[in-house]
Amino acid sequence: MCIDRTLPFALSLEAFACEGKGVLEPLPIDLDRVSTIFATGGTTGYSKGAVWTDRAWQALIDTFRTVSPSCDAIVHLAVGPMTHAAGVLALMMMGQRVTHIVLPKPDPEAILSAIEQYRVTHLYLPPTLLYMLLSHPRVREYDYSSLVSFIVAAAPIAPEKLKEAVNIFGPVMTQAYGQAEAPFLCTYFSRDEIAAAAVGNCDRRLLACGRATPAMEVAIADEEGNFLTDEEQGEIIVRGPLLMREYYRNPVATAEITLPDGWRRTGDIGRRSSDGLFYIVDRKKDMIISGGFNVFAAEVEHVLLAHPSIQDCAVIGVPDEKWGEAVKACIELKPDASVDPEEVIDFCKARIGSVLAPKSVEIWPELPRSGAGKILKRSIRERYWQNADRKI
């Protein structure tokens, strides 16, 4: 069905409505019924189809209503593609009194203006788009007093940016952690906890992605799937009704992430603190091995994003005869900003030392992003690895 016109392969919404008989036969209740095939992010070069059942949707909606702050009349601003998180969030709200405002494209000033104009209460953005809002020269000119919940998800967010967001938008920032294979709400970081950490300048706490939600079990495991204790670093694994059933027509990929007793691998490296907060360290595939040391790209990116001239960045490993892989930072500057690459390297060395600091910095006019707003590190890596004999 096409919303605004008839296509050769689809009815228009108007034609669909006119052809209807006015009565829907009730669907039999079957929580194991397949209802969705959701595309994964595709940042590694291709997408897989995550098969969701009614059980996953029920758990997702119930969890959202349990953990997310609400209000009498929700006004949801849908900014990202409706095929991804923005659309999932819209569907989660449909059982409540909600108005959806859909923007045609994620233009920073249009987003800021829409929050004031429509008295928006809820919206979701990936970190990279939030960074664009924070860098906009008019970001402090609009009224954001209507906001109830400003959700950031899809990637870790730098503490400095999160503090700045609380300062500008108010104590409304929330975080969620999930993926297509276990959607949206495996963990949740409440607006009260984030606001308290931001006001208290507790950067270490702001690195968290929240606590396990009521529907899900979240743990840290080693390569063999053995549970690790608090503060030990390993792969984040999850279990519960939010899990997809399988990858569509891909049993090999499904088996690769499946562990005994219903647990699933996420591909994310993380840890759990003694007070129950989970921290994402990095994606397993983004770890850089430089001179025998493990360098997590996300750790370097958090430091870079604290630089006053940098709007967004991507840290990758590039071929190097001495180091095997050398840490390289590709940065996108704020509007009208300028910076010397060597000054950026020194900035990092002063905060995380020479081993983790980038060996080189390159300024890009714009970093490549997916339709969901994630930076495409694969595209960036290809520029430096295409003529190399190896890929790691």
Image (cartoon, grey):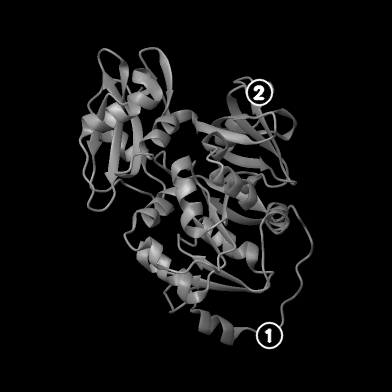
* SS type, badge 2: loop
Does residue 71 lie above or below 190 as drawn? below
Identify the residue under disc 2: 225
158, 377: nearer the viewer? 158
The residue depicted at 52 percent of the width and 40 percent of the height is: 201
Judged left or right of residue 28, residue 150 is left
The residue depicted at 73 percent of the width and 56 percent of the height is: 66
Q: Position of residue 193 (x, y in %)?
A: 63, 46
262, 381: nearer the viewer? 381
133, 43: nearer the viewer? 133
Tell me which label, 2 or 1, sits earlier in the chain.
1
Q: Amino acid at mark 2?
A: Gly
Determine if residue 176 is in view: no
Residue depth check, mark 2 versus mark 1: number of the one nearer the observer: 2
Judged left or right of residue 139, residue 51 is right
Does residue 78 lie above or below 367 as drawn? below
The quarter of the picture where the C terminus appears is top left
Q: Position of residue 233 (x, y in %)?
A: 58, 23
**In the orientation shown, which residue stands out farthest toward the right?**
29
Q: Position of residue 104 (x, y in %)?
A: 40, 69
Q: Residues within 10 Å of mark 2 (few under 14, many from 20)?
A: some
Q: How many marks?
A: 2
Does residue 26 lie above or below 83 as drawn? below
Q: CA distance from mark 2 to mark 1?
A: 52 Å
**In the orientation shown, which residue stands out farthest toward the front?**
200
Q: Residues within 10 Å of mark 1 (few under 14, many from 20)?
A: few
Q: Amino acid at mark 1?
A: Gly
Identify the residue under disc 1: 22
The residue depicted at 65 percent of the width and 36 percent of the height is: 277
Judged left or right of residue 78, residue 186 is right
* SS type, badge 1: loop
Do residues under tags 2 and 1 come within 8 Å of each other at their CB atoms?
no
